[in-house]
């Protein structure tokens, strides 16, 4: 995202951004400033909605939240620049190969012409002295052609190795662009792509699709008490449990902070609830301990919301319904699974009371 505001507008936005950052205890790092400047300048509706949602929920702008905002709305530009750079290097290497082949083709044409001339002279039955000269000429042409071929072979081998390395770099960049660095799960960008593809497939095949939204109970309290390093270990523990419990076409992702999501293609709501409860029970069966001291720090529990895709609905509505079920699970006491069906019954009970 580029900023090209006039000086007076830029100064106003910068002061307002720094003021908001100070009010919400956000460190004035360049990445954080970029997020808040764009928020104040109202550059990105999705970014504004994300920040406003955090403000409405009364959440703190922790390091994780700040990093997630930057990654979601500005990380893509950096990744795209890196991908373009590697792509340009591949294009340059291919261009060199084509240049080598063009040179070799010109040499082959020249050699063919020399052979044709030599054959013509042989037909005319040249004198022995002239024949020796012709043979020397064609030998020189042949040696030159061999040298050209050896050089071409060397250059092609070098270029092939370079292209192979660049392909590895490109694959690595693509992997990093779609993977959460801490947990190794799919990141938010890949989740969005995978959910869109799963919904399209469900529409085309008229098949089922379920979505789990998962939140670690009291994670911020655990983080504040025991520190970010142990908090990271909890996130990794949950990620391993998700990896163990989802298979095949399923996609497990870190949605942001301590929240995760799982896409379950070809899965009805009741089966999605079963998967969610398996994940919940597996995580709850573990105890978190400080490896250095051996001290047991307690149990990790999850609250999970489950929704089933309805043909024709927006992905935002689908996610929102799973989110609502998640927050219902938290309101009901945490460490439990709630589905969209519980939303309906809960609303009816509250209305009747």
Image (cartoon, rainbow, N blue to C red):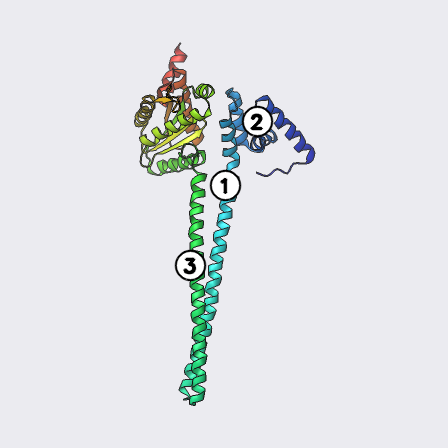
Given residues 5 and 27, the one toward you in this image is 27
Could you tell whether 54 is left or right of 310 in the image?
A: right
Residue 314 visible from this viewpoint: no
Task: Tell me the residue that label 1 is attached to.
Answer: 79
Mark 1: secondary structure: helix
Task: Tell me the residue that label 2 is attached to.
Answer: 27
Q: Is residue 48 above or below residue 222?
A: below
Task: Tell me the residue that label 3 is attached to.
Answer: 157
What mark, if any, has residue 19 been given in the picture?
none
Which residue of the protein is positioned furthest toward the front in this rendering? 293
Q: Quadrant of the C terminus?
A: top left
> What distance separates the C-alpha of mark 1 from that of mark 3?
30 Å
Identify the residue shown where x is 48% and y is 55%.
93
Mark 3: secondary structure: helix
Q: Position of residue 265 (x, y in %)?
A: 34, 34
Given residues 202 and 62, the one toward you in this image is 62
Given residues 222 and 202, the one toward you in this image is 222
Q: Position of residue 46 (x, y in %)?
A: 52, 31
Identify the residue shown where x is 54% and y is 25%.
52
Q: Position of residue 109 (x, y in %)?
A: 45, 72
Q: Is the residue marked by circle 1 packed among few (<14), some (14-19), or many (20+) residues within 10 Å?
A: some
């Amino acid at each position: 995202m580029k900023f090209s505001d006039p000086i007076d507008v830029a100064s106003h936005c910068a002061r307002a951004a720094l003021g908001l950052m100070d009010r919400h205890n956000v460190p004035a790092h360049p990445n954080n400033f970029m997020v808040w400047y764009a928020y104040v300048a109202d550059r990105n509706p999705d970014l504004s909605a994300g920040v406003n949602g955090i403000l409405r929920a009364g959440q703190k702008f922790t390091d994780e939240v700040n990093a997630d905002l930057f990654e979601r709305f500005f990380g893509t530009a950096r990744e795209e620049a890196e991908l373009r750079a590697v792509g340009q290097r591949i294009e340059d290497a291919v261009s060199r190969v084509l240049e080598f082949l063009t040179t070799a083709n010109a040499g082959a044409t020249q050699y063919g012409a020399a052979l044709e001339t030599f054959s013509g002279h042989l037909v005319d039955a040249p004198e022995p002295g002239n024949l020796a000269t012709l043979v020397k000429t064609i030998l020189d042409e042949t040696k030159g052609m061999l040298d050209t071929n050896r050089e071409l072979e060397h250059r092609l081998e070098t270029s092939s190795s370079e292209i192979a390395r660049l392909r590895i770099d490109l694959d690595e960049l693509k992997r990093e662009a779609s993977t959460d660095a801490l947990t190794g799960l799919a990141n938010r960008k890949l989740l969005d792509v995978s959910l869109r593809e799963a919904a399209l497939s469900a529409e085309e095949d008229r098949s089922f699709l379920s979505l789990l939204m998962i939140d670690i109970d009291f994670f911020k309290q655990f983080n504040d008490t025991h520190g970010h390093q142990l908090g990271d270990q909890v996130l990794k523990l949950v990620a391993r449990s998700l990896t163990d419990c989802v298979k095949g076409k399923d996609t497990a992702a870190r949605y942001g902070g301590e929240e995760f999501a799982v896409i379950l293609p070809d899965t009805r709501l009741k089966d999605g609830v079963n998967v969610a409860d398996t994940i919940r029970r597996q995580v709850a069966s573990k105890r978190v301990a400080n490896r250095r001291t051996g001290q047991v720090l307690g149990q990790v529990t999850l609250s999970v919301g489950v929704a089933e895709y309805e043909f024709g609905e927006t992905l935002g509505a689908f996610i929102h319904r799973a989110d609502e079920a998640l927050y219902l699970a938290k309101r009901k006491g945490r460490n439990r699974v709630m589905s969209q069906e519980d939303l309906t019954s809960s609303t009816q009970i509250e209305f009747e009371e």
